[in-house]
Image (cartoon, rainbow, N blue to C red):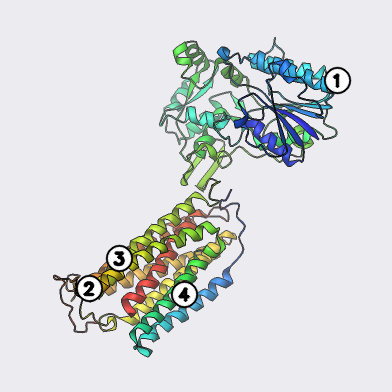
Amino acid sequence: MKVFLTGSTGFVGSYVLRALLDAGHDVRVLVRPGSETRLHDASDAVDIVRGDVTDADSLDGLLDGCEGVVHLVGIIREDVSAGATFERVHLDGARNVIDAATAAGVQRFVLMSANGAKPREDAVSAYQWTKYEAEEHLRASDMEHVIFRPSVIFGRPSGGQPEFASELAGSLLGVPLAPLPLFKDGFPTVAEVAAGLTRPSSSAQRSLATTGSEIELQPVAVEDVAAAMAKAVDRDGVSNTTYDVGGRDRFRWGQLLDVLTLAKGARPRRKIVVPAFLIRFLLGLPIVRSLLPLTADQLDMLLAGNVCDEGPFVRDFDIEPIRFAPDTVAYVGTGVARVATATASSGKYLLRHYDPPAPNTGIGHAKFGMWVFLASEVMFFTGLIGAYIILRNATPGWPDPGDRLSLGLTAFMTFLLIVSSMTLVLSLSAIQRGLQARFKLFLGLTVLCGAAFVGLQVYEWSHFLAHSAPSTDMFWGVFYTLTGFHGAHVTIGVVALAMIYIKALRGGYTETQYGDVEMTGLYWHFVDLVWIILFTIIYLI
Amino acid sequence: MESPSTEHHESHDGAYWRLFAALAVFTLVELAIPSMLPEPRWLMIVLLMAVAGAKAAGVLLYYMHVKFEKRLVAWIAIGPLLFVGILIMLIKADITEVDQGGWTFADAPAVEHEATGH
């Protein structure tokens, strides 16, 4: 089907364009002159035409030959100086496209409206009634139509596109340690003020997150919206229907802020109840208005709530909603893997070793970082070994290592490290398959083998130091240096593995949560690998 | 997105056990080489380094999963070896200088020759 798409350079539009192309449609996209470079998916199947939805004349003939239209153009803030008002963009723009589509004989028109769209007399914002009147104009046309009324839409934006979760996280969570506001109509109660003074992790704060603000939202993933819209252009049984579009879960404002906080890898922040009239007063001051992340219209719409019955949307378009959770909104974070365990007010959200997607490398950031670190370790030990080679060759009368060192003991130590590497990799393999008992058994054996190696090295050193200090001669100097640095690495590994083991005993790892084990494992095997080389050059050659 | 929760994991346990057996055998071989083949010394060194290299490669490929990872990981792992090679070449130049008597360790303490093993 030939589909005419408006708003394709925007956040939702870029996803809808991809979904339409994936569904096999030929897509003609409308872009404003000069905005072509903002088009994210200009494949061969995309026919680019230039025009402006607010200029009816510019649309003449552009929809000829199209059987479907998806109209997405919308704004969330007015820019009066640029002529981008809700009335002009939402209402005039939609009317122009609907009229042009009617004239071009388009069969089906899919319109992106908004949850909360309502007649002018009931609306709290021009945003709401302009969306509603655009719907009414479409309903009055002869075309089949499908209208979507989404709640807030979340998803990874690209190229600075405004997106709900990123903007919220950037504005409210961007100031370190600043308390998060829970907007409320009316004054906070004494209990709410007191709760605002307690620790962020307190039960009073958790309770405040669900009760401190009446604002309730039902975020829906942009992928789900795009998938449904792409299906709406030609699916039977959905025409002339208005769909409320929301995600699976409803969040109170405070809960939603908790999810975003976790997604950024931080612990829950203190929340305080802020009277909405105070914010309205501040928004009335021009200087303050420019500093605050929301408009009076947006505040009013937030307080009015933004939830819906998502059932028909999910059912008719076969949507399995992507949940709004720390891992699905992790794009608001810094992208640095970290450990953050915290209790969000709406339940336990565990964010352990979250490894955000790595679009450029295809490797998780933590793993990539560990490998780069190990590469630097290769150079560290190469420097030491290089110094050893030079010093050994420059020192006359280098002794046979067998005359000074205990080969049997060291061979046993080598065996211990080999065993530990095997038990650790078996342990990782077990937890990846959810075999908890096997995982703990092999992990425990690894710790034991590592600790035994360190213990034997301490014994070996204490024996040698009794008669041969590092300064005795060059042989002992390089021996203590090389085995000392390696021993320090092993010790660090044993401590790390012991900590992981304790956490494992407490059930801290599952078949989907084992980042610690994998990363520490890489380090441990590297230490084993280094020993294989050191053992040969120090003890055998 | 590659994250632990979305990866599919095949079991390589059999390979891990086989590698362990190989590492143990190779270690025994290493222990035997100096006594069984002390001369020529260069051959002993080459053999010992070859066995150690094989052991290290096994650990790298299987225990560190380079064999099963994306190629980029292999490049990160192999990349430093280029610099290792450069460093060893430079060291070799230094050693050659030493052999020619042009570079000495005037302050290097002499090595004691009495056996102190336990």
Q: Quadrant of the N terminus of chain A?
A: top right
Badge 4 amino acid: Ala
Do marks 3 and 4 share a chain?
Answer: no
Q: Is A390 rendered above or below residue A305?
A: below
Which of discs 1 and 2 lies nearer the camera? The answer is 2
| Discs 4 and 2 carry the same chain letter | yes
Residue B56 appears in the rendering? yes
Given this view, does label 2 or label 3 mark the residue nearer the observer? 2
Position above or below: A121 against A541? above
Give the labeled residue for mark 2. B98
Instruction: Output the chain of dot 1.
Output: A
Cα–Cα gap, marks 2 and 3: 19 Å
Q: Which residue is mark 1?
A: A142
Q: Residue furthest left?
A: B107
Disc 4 vs disc 2: which is toward the camera?
2
The crowding category of the residue bearing disc 1, from other C-alpha atoms within 10 Å (few below 14, some 14 to 19, many at least 20), is few
Could you give the CA–CA distance between mark 3 and mark 1, rounded to whole angstroms? 81 Å
* Pointer 3 or 1: first along the chain: 1
Q: Chain of mark 4?
A: B
Chain holding disc 2 = B
User: Which residue is drawn at the image coordinates 49% and 64% (left, top)?
Assistant: B64
Q: Disc 1 to disc 4, how far (Cα)?
A: 76 Å
Residue annotated with mark 4? B54
Asked whether the viewer can see residue A221, the reply is no
**Where residue A373 sits: x, y (%)?**
41, 55
| Residue type at tag 3 | Leu
Identify which residue, B82 or A373, lies in the foreground.
B82
Residue A384 circle label = 3
